Every structure is written in structure tokens, then in C-alpha cells.
Amino acid sequence: MLHLNEGIAPHGGELINRIVSDEQKQEFLAIADSLPSVTIDERALSDLVMIAIGGFSPLTGFMGFADYDRVVTEMRLASGLPWSVPVTLPVDEATAEPLKVGDQIRLNDGNGRFVAVLELTEKFKYDKVKEAINVYRTDEDKHPGVKVIYEQGAVSLAGPVWVMQRDPHPLFPTYQIDPAVSRAMFRERGWKTVVGFQTRNPIHRAHEYIQKCALETVDGLFLHPLVGATKSDDIPAEVRMRCYEIMMEHYFPQDRVILAINPSAMRYAGPREAIFHALIRKNYGCTHFIVGRDHAGVGDYYGTYDAQHIFDEFEPADLGIVPMKFEHAFYCTRTSTMATTKTSPSAPEERIHLSGTKVREMLRRGELPPPEFSRPEVAAELARAMRVPQEV
């Protein structure tokens, strides 16, 4: 276990690094053309990166059946360590059939580029409906996470991975701060307590309110918006990041906040994904994690505060990161401030709530979200970026 002045220990005690050395890279390149190959999709590529940089510590590769099955049924790895979302590499049966356990498999991205080597230790079939019901609490293919399961291959390839190189992010290279680097930054700033914040949505006043409430009680805030694969109707990552840049410039104390990208893909797994996101931020060095209303939710599949309640199913020492639970914030017209039911004396009709769906609809009509919902500079940026030209 790390001492306090060295920061919080990664999940499992060791920060994983699966990026090849220069020597290993040359060895793999020398045999690349002779290796059986598999093309991976955008989500698998994100998972691969997160494994390689230690964001998914203690995972060193894609899960075998023992880990997978226990995660699905009990939210724990085979070792007993808490883990809430499967990280697997599914392929179709035709792709899996010629691959032999013990093989080194060349993993290519969608452009045919050699990105990693998988040391194949296992191939296994799995129950898609069981995974859907346990992880997503539904078997409906209208749920975007369940839809991915139903459309992916029936066989999972398992084993340790080696990533050929860590490339700069194509859109946000200056915000690509991997776990080893974020931990060093926290130490350099003298931060012993750091709260992480996850979002796939543009920042609004309710986000700002809970972030600053959390910042009152810890040394630093790690703003960590997700930039991996999301639903097609979510706001694009480059727009969301620009909104955070505006907030950093005008509304946050820059010496107490670090903005970085989370290269993960969204699962939309609600409560289970809240645990998953917390463990990821633990690996980045956060001691605390903000859990607000309907974290990682979609539609009406999860209760408003289910993502907070799930933390009560674990002993605090097991997770090793402290959830900071916040009620849904709103703009209180009586006090002219952001508030929650814990702090506002107002009646329901004096509270301004705006959902992400309503805001997206406003933006696509070219309407500005009201100042009660969004800072004016952010609202203007969102409207500029998201306005849809009217049909003639």
C-alpha cells in the first residue's frame, strides 16, 4: 500500500503498464506478418488503451471466463476484488475458430493498423441475455448497452495484451493525461485528497455547483470528461471539451482543478458503471468520486439515485475510493442560486430543472439555454456548435 504522501494505491495495488518497450516493439514488428490477426472496433480499442495505461488496473488484458462470470454475477473478479463491468473481446465464431490458445494474435484497428498483441489464453462462449440482465438490468435491445451485447460476436478472446505504442489523442493531445502522469501531478501540487468528476454531457450549472461543493472539502478537482464512444445523439466530445475550457478560463480556480480526458467508451450501465467509473478514477489517483443524479443512466432504466445506493453494497475499504453523493441540483428562483432540496427553502414551482434531452432539443433549434441552466459563454458555444440548419 502506498503511503499517504504518495497518494492512493491503484485498484489491486499496482498500476498496470502494458505498453511495449522499444525492444519488444521491434520483436513484434519482425513477426507481425506471420501472426493471425483480428480487427477490433472502437470500444475494444478504447478498452485496450485503458488496460495498457493502467486505467483498468488490475486488468492486464481481456477477461477470461472466471473473471467475466464472477463480474457478471457478483461484481467481483475471480480474486474477489470488486469490479462491476465486464471487459472482454468478443468476436464472431468464424473469426475465433482458427485461433489457438497459446497463439499470439495481432490486433488491428479499423484502418488495418497493427495496434497490439493478444496472448491468447482462452476462448469462451457466454450468455448474452444473462450479461444484459445482470449488468444493465434489462434485456431490451432499445438499451444502447444491451444492443451492443446482442450485436457483438458470440465468442470472447481472453488473455494479456501488449500495446505497440501510446499515440497522442487525435483531438485532445494536451489533455491526454494518463494515470501515472495524473498521480505525479497530484503529488507535485501537494494534493492528498482529489475528487474525480465523470461526464459524457456538456457542463451545466448543476454540474458546476456539485463540483464546487466537493472542492470545498478536498485539495483538488480532477475534471475527467469521457471522450470515447458514446451514443449518436450525445453531444460530440470536441464540443463538450470546449465548454470545459471555457469554464476553466472563467469560472474555476485553475490552481485547484486539472482538466483531462477519459478515453473510455460509455456502457450506459447506470449503477454498475458508477462503480466502474469510480475505480477508474481511483487508478488515476483520485481519493473521492462525485456520484450525482442518474449517473451513467439512459432512458428510464434506473432509479434516480440507484447509482448512489449501489456503493452501499461494498465495504468502503474494498473499493478504496470515497463516493461523494449529491442530490439533483436546480436553480432556486427564491434565492437566485443553485441548490438542492437539502439547501433550498423553495416550493417545487420555484425550481428550474432542465434535462439534457430538453437542452439538446433547444440547441438544435438554435435556442440558448437560459442562464439559470448554463453559463452564458457555454450556452453560446453549445448553440453555435449544435445548431442544425433549417430545411428549405
Image (cartoon, rainbow, N blue to C red):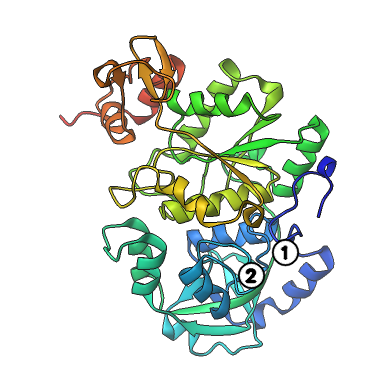
The reply to whether residue 204 is visible in this rendering is no
* Residue 284 higher or lower than 78, as above or below: above
- Quadrant in the rendering for residue 182: top right
* Residue 186 higher or lower than 125, as above or below: above
Residue 33: % across, % down: 65, 79
Residue 254: % across, % down: 67, 22
Residue at horizontal 52%, vertical 90%? 98
Residue type at numbered disc 2: Gly
Q: Which residue is mark 2?
A: 61
Report the residue that reaches farthest toward the top. Answer: 335
CA gap, disc 1 and disc 2 = 9 Å
Residue at horizontal 59%, vertical 23%? 248
* Residue 75 higher or lower than 155, as above or below: above
Residue 180: % across, % down: 76, 48
Mark 2 and mark 1 in contact (Cβ < 8 Å)? Answer: yes
The reply to whether residue 268 is visible in this rendering is yes
Residue 137: % across, % down: 35, 61
Q: Quadrant of the C terminus?
A: top left
Q: Quadrant of the N terminus?
A: bottom right
Q: Nearer the viewer, residue 210 or 252?
A: 210
Residue at horizontal 41%, vertical 25%? 340
**Mark drawn on residue 18:** 1
Tally of numbered tags? 2
* Residue 191 higher or lower than 11, as above or below: above
Which comes sooner in the sequence, label 1 or label 2? Answer: 1
Left or right relative to 147: residue 121: right
Circle 1 SS class: loop
Mark 2, Cα crowd under 10 Å, few <14 / some 14-19 / many 20+, is many
